[in-house]
Amino acid sequence: MIKAEYIWIDGTDPTPRLRSKTRVLESGDSLPALLDSLPQWSFDGSSTNQAEGSSSDCLLNPVWAGHDPLRGGRNILVLCDVYVPGGLPHSSNKRYDCKGISAEYEKEECWFGLEQEYTLMSNGRPLGFPRDGYPDPQGPYYCSVGASNAHGRQIVEEHLDLCLQAGLRISGINAEVMPGQWEFQVGPLGPLMVSDQLWVARYLLERVAEKYGVTVSWEGKPMKGDWNGAGCHTNFSTLAMRTQEGLYEKAAEALRGSAQMHISNYGHGIEERLTGLHETCSYEDFRWGVSDRGASVRIPLQVAREGVGYIEDRRPNANCDPYLVTTLITHTICKELRGE
Ligand code: ADP
Ligand code: MN
Ligand code: MN
Ligand code: MN
């Protein structure tokens, strides 16, 4: 017997949440062949903001499977996208268009590296914040060591191990600028794969934190005032950008024309975070610059020096849907680089 944890993204407005339920399967197959034999499965969409009670069935369609490091053994995690009974993608299913764009621009060999920031919360306060009042101002917490500055490391370390065991391409972790705030990075991978893996990594984090009675806030600005927000910096390159000098400038500039459209799809509450302070550029402006953490788009110093490599879109919020973000960036930049 295999326990398969079917994971999906619900229809919660304005920010979707993760859901999952377990199916016990009798199968002699193992991964990756097992993915092809996994059945579709229905669920009650009226309980996830995805359907009316009168016709509540929605369909889970398995798209990714990996070892379940929480249960171990032959058990698996199964990421799904959601369809309505007629066979069309549900309106909450942003993966569908991401798949289309990925195929359309396959030749460009797009790579994404996503820097997922998040805040660990206990009793409605970030870890490291006293019940009343505030901790010392920001300064010592980023990449900190020591119990007075690093809060929640056990969860963070366990999460990293689980991601590696599940087969995710997680590329690093670090403590962030605000107490209780951390980051993990996924990539570099193509648009669809990086988004699938980011959602599974988010799932694993929620599950580890659950064990400790801690909640994960994906909010872009969990603490108002003089505290850093949480983003999902999105690093992007195409094969041409990685090999032909100077193309990074064209790619960064391509994002100017549709800046507002991108921002409106980069996560709820983004205006609260993109204030122009705390290492952000205002949501009303668009600016790119070399090594500039106050720009919308940063060109890493080494990329400017070598003339080839990736750009960093610093705007996406921690609570963004990576399917939307990678779809838009791929489309906007590749279209421009193709001269279409
Ligand atoms: P920062 O310096 O902004 O904190 P990080 O090291 O946290 O950057 O994250 C950078 C991310 O970019 C990593 O996930 C890394 O794998 C990814 N990355 C590296 N090279 C490329 C590339 N050529 N194209 C896209 N992403 C890349
Ligand atoms: Mn980073
Ligand atoms: Mn960061
Ligand atoms: Mn960054």
Image (spheres, rainbow, N blue to C red):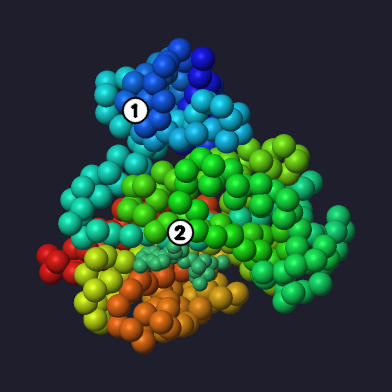
**230 up-or-down from 196: above or below:** below
In this view, 248 is above or below 61: below
Q: Residue 283: x and y, percent?
A: 46, 70
- From this viewpoint, which residue is outermost toward the bottom? 305
Q: Which residue is mark 2?
A: 114
Question: Dot 2: within a 10 Å radius of its alpha carbon, few (fewer than 14), some, or many (20 or more) residues?
Answer: many
What kind of residue is marked 1? Ala
Tell me if residue 246 comes above or below residue 126 in the rendering.
below
Residue that appears at 40% across and 30% down:
31
Which quarter of the figure has residue 219? bottom right
Residue at the spot 24% in from the left edge and 66% down from the top edge: 239
Three-letter amino acid code of the residue under disc 2: Leu
* Label 2, ligand 1: CB separation under 8 Å: yes
Residue 148 location, quadrant: bottom right
Asked if labels 2 and 1 touch by Cβ distance under 8 angstroms, the answer is no
- What secondary structure is found at the residue carrying circle 1? helix
Q: In the displayed structure, does residue 150 sit left or right of residue 110?
A: right
Q: What secondary structure is found at the residue carrying circle 2?
A: strand
Per the image, the residue denoted by label 1 is 33
Is residue 130 visible in the rendered structure shown here? yes
The x, y position of residue 319, in whole percent, is: 52, 52
